[in-house]
Amino acid sequence: MSTLLEKLDLLRSDVQRVTDTQWEYRLMQRNRLEQLEPRLAELGDAGWELVGVTRDEGFVFKRRKGRASSDARP
């Protein structure tokens, strides 16, 4: 029985961590497309994830809040 309770407690903490997650977003304009490709690995290492592309505005990136401000930015 204690094993089940321990697993439930771990699950509850995982759910809490996920629901408490906050994101920051950045936009990279389309006119900087030639700069995007060489920087994808750098952006990924800094926690940025490409989450959308808009026709007019460009590329939308997100990452968890709280990363160091010196990390790469789109």
Image (cartoon, grey):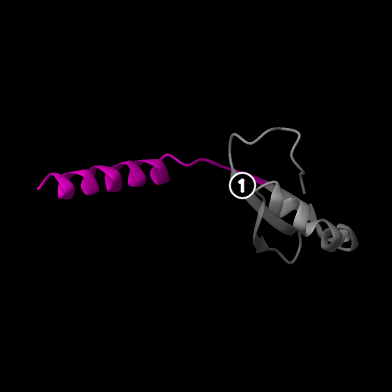
Answer whether residue 12 is magenta in the image. yes
Q: Nearer the viewer, residue 68 or 32?
A: 68
Q: Which residue is mark 1?
A: 63
Relative to 3, say whether 35 is above or below: below
Q: Position of residue 50 (x, y in %)?
A: 67, 59
Q: Is residue 42 left or right of residue 22?
A: right
Tag count: 1
Answer whether residue 67 is magenta in the image. no
Relative to 11, say whether 36 is above or below: below
Residue lying farthest to the left in this orientation: 1
Relative to 35, say whether 65 is above or below: above
Circle 1 crowding by C-alpha within 10 Å: few under 14, some 14–19, many from 20: some
Q: Position of residue 2 (x, y in %)?
A: 13, 44
Q: Is residue 1 left or right of residue 15?
A: left
Residue lying farthest to the bottom in this orientation: 55
Q: Is residue 61 left or right of residue 41?
A: left
Q: What residue is shown at x 29% (from left), y 44% (from top)?
A: 10
Q: Position of residue 41 (x, y in %)?
A: 76, 57
Q: Is residue 23 left or right of residue 55?
A: left
Q: Nearer the viewer, residue 55 or 12?
A: 12
Q: What residue is shown at x 74% (from left), y 39% (from top)?
A: 71
Residue interval drawn in magenta: 1-25
Q: What residue is shown at x 21% (from left), y 44% (from top)?
A: 6
Q: What residue is shown at x 67% (from left), y 51% (from top)?
A: 48
Callout 1: helix, strand or loop? strand
Please state which amino acid type lies under the numbered disc 1: Arg
Q: Position of residue 67 (x, y in %)?
A: 63, 36
Q: Magenta span: helix, strand or loop, mainly?
A: helix
